[in-house]
Amino acid sequence: MTQGTEEHPVSTIDPDRAAGVDWDAVVVGAGLAGSIAARGLARSGRRVLLVERTAFPRPKVCGCCLGPLGRATLESVDLGHVLDACRARPLESVQLHVGRRPAHVPLRGVVGVSREALDQHLAREAVASGTELLLEARAEPRPDGTVGLQVDGRRFELAARTVLHAGGLRAHDSDGPGHGEDVMVGFGALVPTPGRLRGADRVEMVLDRDGYVGVAPLDDGRMTVASALRTEAIKRTGGPRAVVKRLLHGAGLGELVDETTRFTGVPALRRRRTLVQEDRLLAIGDAASFVEPITGEGMSWALASGAAVVPCAEAVIAHGPGVDHWTTAWRRLMRRRHLRCSIVGSCIRRPALVRAALAVSSILPVMRAPILSGLLGGRESMPEGEPA
Ligand SMILES: Cc1cc2nc3c(=O)[nH]c(=O)nc-3n(C[C@H](O)[C@H](O)[C@H](O)COP(=O)(O)OP(=O)(O)OC[C@H]3O[C@@H](n4cnc5c(N)ncnc54)[C@H](O)[C@@H]3O)c2cc1C
């Protein structure tokens, strides 16, 4: 198979050959969670196949703000250099537009990083550690350790001692909220940075009854526009572009979006699997659970769970599916973070409440730090001693 350019990783194995291998692990989805987990297992000598539905580079709806937990996780598995290679840039603050006057929130330890660059670098690191990569292949992972594969209209069957589901929000396609319900959905676009915002080191965030939009600068002359919008507002206003434009207009940023802006959508947010481990199948990243993008933590959660799953997957490879270590480890890692994010998500659906909280914080400055760090907790800092 082709070696791949420095820019775009390519397949290292074809499906016929992959179907004949006795895999230790098949990892479904070459996003952040999948690549970091595949690399970890390959580094300990396991035979690992990483299967990805698309080809690189692929669009990804994301605000691209990576917080301290994600950075610490990369450092902990000797991947800190990847952020330099992706030209991640420090983000100093968030400008929160929720009332007439924007609130300024300082950030600590947060960087803006292109998802195109980061995902490709991590997939390349997985391959460099011995992982086989199969792109443009749609996988159907099953608890018994088998994986159905569809490539170019052909079907294949794979077998592995453990299967990691890292397929992101799409992993929940069949069990999400119904189409008629008023839920939040994600939309994102990459737009050219206007002259007046070049060199900016802050995130603009607009909150409204119809949803919220974040705009962050990248180091490649573009900005990421990422939004979570109520489906009812999208129907009422005539599409996601119109809702995003209206929200940005209110913050003086309406010029960022026009009729040429191409938005990509993701399925309904707030997803959770009933079982994160089911026999030989272990779910990580968004495939295990996703709450809200508001606190900017999803990438960190994906990286942290992708790193933390490695010893649990090793146990399944070595001893079979008898003991469920992953559910316990995953709960320990995520429960508190999910709870806080869920509370913040519920509060921001009431912009009047956020405005009142900000008003209190301006009258009582002592309340400012707790209120703002509660709102943007994941972006601000990681408590001392937190496990990566
Ligand atoms: C609007 C919005 C804004 C966000 N902003 C931020 C932010 O600023 N900071 C932050 O930290 N997080 C943010 N997030 C969250 C973050 O993007 C995700 O949590 C993160 O990408 C999850 O990584 P993952 O590896 O679990 O999944 P993904 O990155 O989604 O990767 C999953 C991969 O699996 C592949 N795949 C899916 N199904 C299959 C299949 N059947 N077979 C093979 N491959 C498959 C997909 O093509 C994809 O490549 C945001 C999310 C949204 C929706």
Image: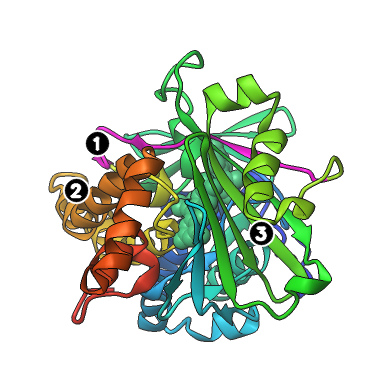
Name the residue that disc number 3 marks. 224
Question: Within 8 Å of ligand 1, the CB of disc 3?
Answer: yes
Identify the element where label 3 is drawn: strand
Residue visible at 26% across and 46% down? 343
Q: Which of 140 and 300 is in front in this view?
A: 300
Instruction: Tell me, yes or no, whether the two marked residues, 1 and 2, touch with CB atoms within 8 Å.
Output: yes
- Rendering coords of residue 187 (x, y %): 62, 41
Instruction: Tell me, yes or no, whether the two marked residues, 3 and 2, touch with CB atoms within 8 Å.
Output: no
Residue with the most extreme right position: 260
Q: Residues within 10 Å of mark 3 (few under 14, many from 20)?
A: many
Q: Which of 301 and 222 is in front in this view?
A: 222
Identify the element where label 1 is drawn: loop
Disc 3 marks a residue whose amino acid type is Thr
Disc 2 marks a residue whose amino acid type is Thr
Identify the element where label 2 is drawn: helix
Residue 146 shows which numbered tag?
none
Write the start and end of the magenta stretch as one range.
Answer: 261-277
Residue visible at 60% across and 69% down? 118
